[in-house]
Amino acid sequence: MPDLPDRSPDTRRWLFADQLGPHFLDTPRQPVLLVESQDVFRRGRYHRRKAHLLLSALRHRAAELGERAVFVQAGTYREALAECGGPVSVCDPTSYRARRFVRSLPDVEVLASRGFVVSEEQFAGWADRRGDKRLLMEDFYRDVRRHHGLLMDGEAPLGGSWNYDQDNRSGPPRQESLDVAEPWWPTEDDIDAGVREDLDRWARDDGVEFTGSDGPRRFAATRREALRALRHFLSDRLEQFGTYEDAMLAGDEWMAHSLLSAPLNLGLLDPVEVARRAEEHGREHRVRLASVEGFVRQVVGWRSYTWHLYWHLGEDYKQRNALGAHQELPRWFADLDADAVEANCLKHVLAGVRDEGWVHHIPRLMVLGNWGLQRGYRPADLADWFWRNFVDGYDWVMTTNVVGMSQHADHGVLATKPYASGGAYIDRMSDFCGGCRYDPRVRVGEDACPFTAGYWNFLAGHREELSGNRRMAQALKGLDRLRDLDGVLHQESERGSGPP
C-alpha cells in the first residue's frame, strides 16, 4: 500500500472542524482559513455537548494559529469564503454533502482526504484485488498492520496471533467501578466560556435547538490536550482496557476506555501515531498484549474500515433497509428522555447520552442499537440520531456502524448476523439487571424484560428473511420451543412506541 501524498503549500488551507491537526497542513507556516457557521446547527438538533466541543476546538485552533489564520464567523460557508477572498485548498471533507459543496465552489482546490491509515484509492485497490471474496475487516486490519509495521515481529504478528478478542470479553467485576485511574479531564478556559455564552444566546434568541444537557467539557479540544489524554490513557488505563472493553457498569460510565474517539475524529490525532505510541508504551512497560492489540484494532482497524466502507459502498447505502424497518423514532427516544424509561439498561444508557453525549461501543450496539433493531426504527433516521447526539459522531462514523453493523439493514454486507439479543446478554455483560423492575428471564407479563420479549418478537417477525443465515439457525429453532410465543407476540404488538 504505497503512500499517495498531495501537496499545495502556497495556498491558504481551509480546515473543517474535523481537520484540526497538523497533518492537515503541508508546511508548518501554511496560512489557514477556519469557518464557524451557525447555519450548520440549524439543519437539525445537535447535542449541546457536541456543539460546544466543535466550536471550542475551532476557536482554540484559531487562537493557536494567530495571524496565520483567517477565522470567519458567518451564517454560511459561502458567506465566509466570500469574506476571506482568494483561492483556498481543502482536504476532501468527511461527508457526501460536504464533498459536493466544496466541488461546486470556484477557487477551491480539493485535495485527497487525510487522517486515516490508508487512502481511499488504496482501499479501492485492496477491495478490487479481493475479487469475489467478501470484504472482511479482519483481513483489512491485518494488511494495515503489515503495511505500517504495527505490532509485528518480523513478518508475523506480535505474540503469534493477529486477534485477541477471545481474551477481551470479560463481564464486569462484582464491584461498582473498575480499579483504574479516572480519565484525564481538560480544564475549561475563556474560550469555552465564550462558546457556552454563544450557545445560550443562539438557543434563547435565534431559535437554534439542541438536545441533551450542558456540562463541563470532557474531551480534548486541542492537539496539546489530545496528547495529554493519550499519554494518560496509555500510562494509567490501557492495561485494563481490553479485559473489560465489552462490559458495562452502572456506576462507571467511562470504564477503562480511552475517550480518544472525539479528538481522533476532530483530526487532532493521527490514528497511526496513536497506534505506534500504544505499541511503544506496551512494549516498554510490558502491558497486557491483548489490551494493546484490542485498542490498536479499534484505532487502525475498525475505525478506518468504517471510514472506507462509507465511501466504497456509496451514498445510497444509508437508505438500505433489508428488514423493512419503518417506525419513526418516538419522541421520548429522540429527546433523550431517560426519565420516562423504567428498564434500567436503556434508562442508564439514554441518560449517559443525554448528560455526556457519549457512551462506549457496547451500550451503543447492544442497548441502543439492539432496542432500535427490535422496535423497527428506520435505519437512516437512527444513524442520524446517533451522529447528531454523540460528541464523536459524524455521518461517516454512524452510517455503516448503524445501518450495517447495528441494524443489519444491508442484509449482511458488514456483519454476518443481526446484533439482536435478549436480556440475558445484558445481564451477563452488565450490572443493570440487578435492580431493574423487569426480569431478563421473563418473556410475558408485567415483569417481562422488554429486551427479552423484543428479541423473540424480532426473530418471529423476520424469520423468513433470516432463515438462510446459518449463524441464526439455532436462534430461529428456539422459536419452535417457546410455549408462550403467541403470548409474546400479542404482548409486543400491544406495547406500542412508548418507553419501556
Image (tube, grey):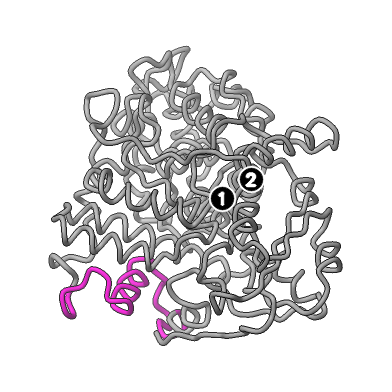
Q: Secondary structure at mark 2?
A: helix
Q: Is residue 327 magenta?
A: no
Q: Residues within 10 Å of mark 2 (few under 14, many from 20)?
A: many
Q: Name the quadrant containing residue 45.
A: top right
Decide which of 390, 277 is in the foreground and name it: 277
Decide which of 309, 469 is in the foreground and name it: 309
Contact between marks 1 and 2 (CB within 8 A): the answer is yes
Q: Name the quadrant containing residue 386.
A: top right
Position above or below: 249 against 129: above
User: What residue is shown with label 1?
Assistant: 393
* Residues rendered magenta in the picture: 127-156
Residue 264, x across and y down, in percent: 48, 57
Residue 291, x across and y down, in percent: 23, 52
Q: Residue at x 49, y 38 (%)?
A: 187
Q: Amino acid at mark 1?
A: Gly
User: What residue is shown with label 2?
Assistant: 388
Q: Please state, as top left, top right, bottom left or bottom right, where the N terminus lies in the image.
A: bottom left
In the displayed structure image, the side of residue 283 where residue 115 appears, left or right? right
Q: Tell me how far mark 1 sits from mark 2, CA to CA.
A: 7 Å
Q: Secondary structure at mark 1?
A: loop
In this view, the residue farthest toward the front is 67
In the displayed structure image, the side of residue 298 where residue 349 appears, left or right? right
Q: Please state, as top left, top right, bottom left or bottom right, where the C terminus lies in the image.
A: top right
